[in-house]
Image (spheres, helix red, strand yellow):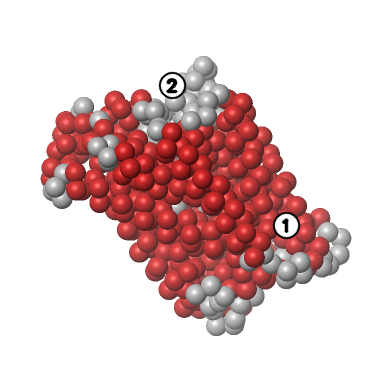
Amino acid sequence: MNSISATSQSLSFAIFAGLVSVTLLLCIMTSADRDDLDEFYTGFRTLAPMRNGLAIAGDYISAATVLSTIGVIALTGFDGLTLALSTALSLLLLMLLLAEPLRNAGRFTMGDALTHRAASRSVRVAATAVTLAALLPLMVFQLSGAGQLVTLVLGFEGSSVRTAVIVALGVLMIGYAAIGGMKGTALIHIIKLVVLLAAASLLAVLVMDKVGWDSARLLSLADAGSGRGPDYSRSGLLMAPTPLGRLDMISGALTVVLGAACLPHVTMRMYTAKDAPAIRRAMSWAVIVMSVFVGLIAVIGVGATALLGHQAIEAGGPQGSTAILQLAQAIAADSATASTLVFTTVATAVFLTLLSSVAGMILACGNSLAHDLYAHVLSRGPVTPRREMRTARLAAFAVGLPAIALAVLVQDRGLRPLITLSFCIAASAIAPALVFTLFWRRYTRTGLLATLIGGTLSSVGVLTFSTQVSGSPQALFPEADFSVFPLTTTGLISIPTGFLLGWAGTLLARRDTRVRQRHEYESAEPRILAGTAGHP
């Protein structure tokens, strides 16, 4: 990126500081009472469908979605648009298939939904472990990105300064989760989403104005700016146009569709609706917002290539993660005042996105540790609401502090494998477990554990030996090469593995166990699928 003006840096710093103060105050004002678990975990299920839908969309749109997806679109064109559409399709899948059954089966956490047939400590432990495994890599990626963004925007230099920023922002995000709970983080997500949509709309309008509102001209300029000509508008830039490359593209799209819908901090929002009609309306709002957002980032990504060129975007980072900031800085360069306002608006939106996304993930992990692991596994007797809530708030620190430490350790490495790992675990372990648990009558505890453990281990094992981790310049360990798996995502291997292990584990269970758990499901089926017996 070109150097950022001192005016932009000063204005950005003032706005960042103001946002931190206001959002922290809002969290304190909306914080739950010390002995009210329903308020902390679900916000009393009092959010109106539209506000709940905005909160769901806000949780769904992470910094990875904003920065990485725009960068991929800018650098790879059609393939990047395909992945962006896969993200929107994922939320539609969640709405049509899982949202209502999840709301009816669960209470506070994913562990509640997975044990709705019968209490099981082993399932609670596995659910907590998989929640941490799916969200910790994503938290590390976004904390590292937050440090890089703030130091870039404010003009700071040096790894020690970036480390201090990561630590400070990480502690702030932990505070959001521990103090605000579900209601506080929902409010921050709504504010984030409004600011982000406003900034994205402004940038998209300016891009279209630059090309005279002619989409054909925008695409032709992008073809020229990409340096690849018409190939920019065709598949093949992200993955090689070979049978193996196409297979990799299918694997990536499948992983995004299944994984993004089942990440624990997203499914956690399903429990905040008061009834099934409310979650249907909330999800409708979320899908509409997500569809609009995908359209906006498509214009922004293509516009970045058209107006800046491939080389300038790649110079800002090999994966184009600063493309939106580069475009915001250049789009109104003929007017210093307009350039400052546009850049500051976009930087503010990205900053808010980073803060709110990590806070939601910390909350999901802390809730699982407190509710699933502590209250239902480790405690020797009934746990009072006040004690469980105190544990949930302490658990936010227990999750957040290691995430901060890891983000500091890997801040100078290529971190795309961390995003991939989170989505692969969600697609390979959580998605099959939820689908089987909510819809298959014969599914047993053995099959569920096989799905959760096997899907997670297969994702980690296969990805370890892919070019995402070693053997390429953008890998997590570029200096080493122990890659043997030719694809960049594990979906084609680990997703079928998760489903097959669940099926095999169920068949291997004792017959009386299968019969008993089928009867347990049939007794709960009206509540799960139709919500006829009320919320658990």
Answer whether residue 210 is visible to the viewer in this image.
yes
> Above or below — where is 157 with respect to 496?
above
Q: Position of residue 102 (x, y in %)?
A: 54, 67
Q: Are marks 1 and 2 in contact (CB under 8 Å)?
A: no
Instruction: Point out the tag, 1 or 2, that comes first from the N-terminus.
Output: 1
Residue 487's image quarter?
Answer: top left
Give the residue drawn at x 71%, y 47%. 397
Q: In the depicted view, which residue is nearer to us: 341 or 292?
A: 341
Which residue corresponds to mark 2? 473
Give the side of residue 202 with respect to residue 151, left or right.
left
Q: In the depicted view, which residue is nearer to us: 92 or 495?
A: 92
Q: Amino acid at mark 2?
A: Pro
Which residue corresponds to mark 1? 392
Q: In the depicted view, which residue is nearer to us: 421 or 120?
A: 421
Q: Amino acid at mark 1?
A: Ala
Indicate the secondary structure of the residue bearing disc 2. loop
